[in-house]
Amino acid sequence: VVVIACPCALGLATPTALLVGTGRAAQLGIVVKSPEVLESTREITTFVWDKTGTLTEAQLEVFDVAEHEASRHTILAFAAAAERNSEHPLARAIVRAAQREHAPTWHASDFTTTAGMGVSATVWQPQADGSQTAVEVKVGKADFFTDVPSDDLPASFHGTTLVWVAADSEIIGAIALHAPLRPTAGAAVARLADMGISSVLLTGDRLEAADKVATELGITEVHANVLPGDKREVVKMLQRRGQTVAMVGDGVNDAAALAQAGAKGLGMAMGSGTDVAIAAADITLMRTDPLAAPTAITISRKTLRVIKQNLFWAFAYNVAAIPLAMAGVLNPMIAGAAMACSSVIVVLNSLRLRHAER
Ligand code: ADP
Ligand code: MG
């Protein structure tokens, strides 16, 4: 009885599966923070995707400038001067474009950033007589200004990420930016749909730009123009609707929403993202590949399934063999062999996870 009841298989059932499952995930670039996270993957009903940097490439490019009261060069010079200190991908793109097009470099001071809105600064514009005039420059989304002449925009600006540039409260132009979709974004949304998981798009960008991406990917629920502080509220709202949410994001502005999703579901950080997002997440996707998100769910679920199978076999063997041993009909040699066999079976079953794919 003692030989047969030695709980080796039972003891091995869970840790071996976890070890092999999370090891396989790591091979595929999916880092799971703790084993409890696997459990959360079971009930996920909804994926909330951040747009910029997650479904699209992290790097934006300026592709056009609409001139209102100033030349393209002047607009870029003002905007780049005001954005110089900003880490936002929009800001980096504007500074790069100004350099590429050899727009003049002007001195700026008194930088302020309004999260999810834009930046302002005092830019010192050189005059013909050698002096410099202070110009109050603002760069940001439409809501950042009292009034923007959006009717005058060229057709090519449709569905783009867009910032307006104002000098001394006068709109002088608009800059259209674009980030291409990541190549596997569509496949990721489609695979989740196959698994019965719906996708939601969540972004601070304007609705037009969000809608364009959503349509291309087949996402029907879009929350656009969401301020960084309100992204969490959107996740909460979905949770109140009874959905178990997994959120995928990369930015500082996604961290609170990632933590909120993680409280009842899952938070996933895209590896190119910021440290804050990674710290707030349960799972980090080391590859900047949206397909890694459904893969993380599949591997986690497979691991859970193997744990259950292992526990079943470990129990079944005891339930069948202990009464036999107690009745004295089991030779201790055979009991020892059976005991070892059950452990080997559990380990082999766990090792199947080594080849678990997507
Ligand atoms: P996202 O969800 O796309 O990362 P953010 O919350 O960072 O969005 O920004 C939302 C919007 O606010 C941007 O699309 C842009 O219009 C405006 N914005 C934010 N930061 C800046 C900035 N540094 N310069 C200009 N516009 C900005
Ligand atoms: Mg982002």
Image: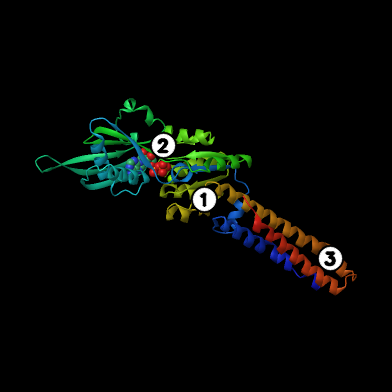
Task: Check disc 1 and give the amino acid type.
Answer: Met
Q: Which residue is mark 1?
A: 268
Of the numbered discs 2 and 3, the one sitting upstream in the chain is 2
Quarter of image, res 22: bottom right
Of the numbered discs 1 and 3, the one sitting upstream in the chain is 1
Q: Which mark is residue 97?
A: none
Please provide percent x and percent y for residue 117.
34, 40
- Cβ of mark 2 under 8 Å from ligand 1: the answer is yes
Quarter containing the N terminus: bottom right
Q: Nearer the viewer, residue 169 or 175?
A: 175
Please provide percent x and percent y for residue 230.
43, 42
Residue 247 appears left or right of 151? right
Q: Which residue is mark 2?
A: 225
Q: Are marks 2 and 1 in contact (CB under 8 Å)?
A: no
Q: Residue at x 66, y 60 (%)?
A: 17
| In front: label 1 or label 3 | 1
Of the numbered discs 2 and 1, the one sitting upstream in the chain is 2
Q: From the viewer's perspective, is residue 203 above or below residue 283?
A: above
In what element is the residue under mark 1?
Answer: strand
Q: State the separation of the CA atoms marked 2 and 3.
A: 63 Å
Residue 354 appears left or right of 182? right
Q: From the viewer's perspective, is residue 79 above or below residue 10?
A: above
Please provide percent x and percent y for residue 241.
56, 38
Please provide percent x and percent y for residue 343.
74, 66
Q: Residue at x 23, y 47 (%)?
A: 110
Residue 116 appears left or right of 299? left
Q: From the viewer's perspective, is residue 114 above or below residue 24?
A: above
Q: Which residue is mark 3?
A: 321
Q: Residue at x 70, y 66 (%)?
A: 11
